[in-house]
């Protein structure tokens, strides 16, 4: 009998919505820090940070998903992910937990007003539904 290998995900929140990213794609999670703004960039690019000598661009999922801007709080975090050859920071309202999903369903065309192509699927965790992000789509959707 073959045991099913369950992937682990880091679950985080923006507003009242829960999202997740595969744990293998995450480099680290850091507290908010000063972000140096850069001119002439898309509205969701908040700027860059210096992460131990490496310059890392920082994006706002809130802005990407066309949610109203909100001041950062004590729970705001930057999820630093590896994407292709780059390291990118993603600002989230809070990081909830590391989790696995009992079931993952294909995403609908739209998830709460957000293009379904941004999602690998919708994870079921008890009675909660969590949008599992597809980093390629999220980070490259404007290219």
Image: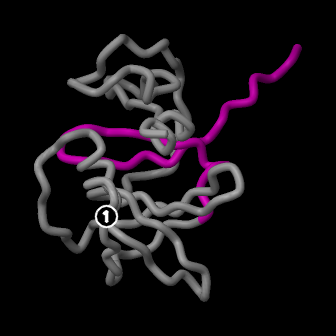
Residue at screen point 50% across, 48% down? 10
Is the N terminus in the top left, top right, bottom left or bottom right quadrant? top right
- Residue 54, position in %: x, y? 60, 80
Q: Quick check: is 72 in the magenta stretch?
A: no
Q: In this view, does 120 lie to the left or right of 2?
A: left
Is residue 17 shown above or below 41?
A: above
Which residue is label 1 attached to? 40
Pick whichever, 100 or 81, lies toward us.
81
Colour approach in the figure: one colour
Q: Is residue 143 left or right of residue 109?
A: right
Q: Quick check: is 21 in the magenta stretch?
A: yes
Tell me the magenta residue range: 1-27
- Residue 9, position in %: x, y? 55, 43
Is residue 75 shown above or below 59?
A: below
Indicate the secondary structure of the residue bearing disc 1: loop
- Residue 70, position in %: x, y? 12, 60
Residue at screen point 32% across, 83% down? 34
* Residue 128: quadrant of the picture: top left
Q: Going by the picture, which residue comes out furthest to the front?
A: 40
Pick whichever, 45 or 65, lies toward us.
45
Numbered label tally: 1
């Amino acid at each position: 009998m073959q045991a099913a290998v369950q992937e682990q995900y880091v679950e985080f929140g923006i507003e009242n919505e829960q999202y997740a990213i595969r744990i293998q794609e995450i480099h680290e999670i850091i507290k908010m820090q000063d972000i140096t703004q850069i001119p002439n960039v898309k509205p969701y690019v908040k700027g860059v940070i210096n992460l131990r000598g490496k310059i890392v661009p920082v994006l706002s999922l809130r802005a990407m998903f066309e949610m109203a801007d909100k001041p950062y709080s004590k729970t705001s975090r930057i999820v630093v992910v590896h994407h292709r050859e780059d390291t990118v920071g993603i600002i989230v309202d809070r990081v909830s937990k590391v989790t696995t999903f009992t079931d993952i369903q294909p995403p609908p065309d739209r998830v709460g007003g957000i293009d379904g192509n941004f999602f690998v699927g919708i994870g079921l965790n008890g009675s909660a539904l969590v949008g599992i992000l597809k980093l390629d789509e999220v980070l490259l959707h404007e290219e």
